[in-house]
Amino acid sequence: MLRLKLPTDPRWANIAEKNIEEILTDHAFCEQKAASAAISFIVQYPELTELVDAMTDLAREEMEHFQRVHDQLKKRGFILGRERKDDYVLDLQRFFKERGGVGRTVHLVNKLLTAAMIEARSCERFRVLSENISEKELSEFYHELMISEAGHYTMFLKFARQYGEGELDVDALWNDFLEYEAKVIAKYGRTERVHG
């Protein structure tokens, strides 16, 4: 379903499990950034009512996820650390910068596809965690969030196709982006970060 070209090595879960505080802190900030991104769509595209409605719901859901991850930190006696820079996301954004393209629709589709890719990889990483982490509570937690991320991925891809129709070949662009993402993610998978 996700069509990612390079799967995460299951051994990454062992790296993450050795530093639960770090993976949970990074995950918390991923959820906060996802909420901020949803709000950004509302601010930048207020005329797209269907998108505004969906992003309103998403911002709420992502902040609920942030709270749940923060609760996991507190339960273990950890304090939320400082925000981590997400180099994976910065690398993804280079794909569209290098391709160029102008116009409001192009910018919107690029943002939607970037969000879809982040959600797809997060979904895949949460699956790896849910299947390979030894702590039952966290395994179930990540399984639940994996399902949620899959829904976000399909929603963003649907909106990209909807708003790009007639102006962009969104499926061709997505296929190129999937190939690019495989090269990007090959550099990661060695740290206890959601995308690291």
Image: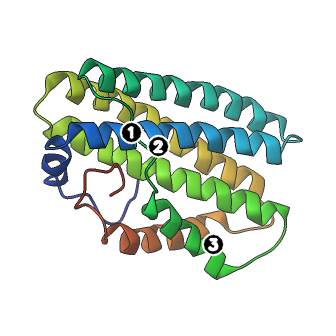
Percent x, y of residue 140: 24, 24
Tag 2 secondary structure: helix
* CB-based contact (under 8 Å), mark 2 and mark 3: no
Residue 18: image tag: none
Judging by the rendered image, the residue that carries numbered circle 1 is: 81
Q: Residue at x 66, y 57 (%)?
A: 111
Most extreme residue toward the right is: 47
Q: Which residue is drawn at 75% across and 29% down?
A: 53
Rendered view: 55 above or below 136: below
Residue in the foreground of this view, choosing between 94 and 175: 94
Could you tell which of marks 1 and 3 lies nearer the N-terminus? 1
Could you tell which of marks 2 and 3 lies nearer the N-terminus? 2
Circle 2: residue type: Cys
* Residue 172 seen by the camera: no
Q: Decide: few, some or many residues near mark 3? Use Cα within 10 Å; few <14, some 14-19, many ≥20.
A: some
165 sits to left or right of 35: right
Residue 96: image tag: 3
Rendered view: 130 above or below 187: above
Q: Decide: few, some or many residues near mark 1? Use Cα within 10 Å; few <14, some 14-19, many ≥20.
A: some
**Render colour scheme:** rainbow
Tag 3 secondary structure: helix
Rendered view: 140 above or below 190: above
Circle 3: residue type: Phe
Q: Distance between the residues labelled 1 and 2?
A: 13 Å
Judging by the rendered image, the residue that carries numbered circle 2 is: 30
Circle 1: residue type: Gly
Q: How far apart are marks 1 and 3 (CA)?
A: 31 Å
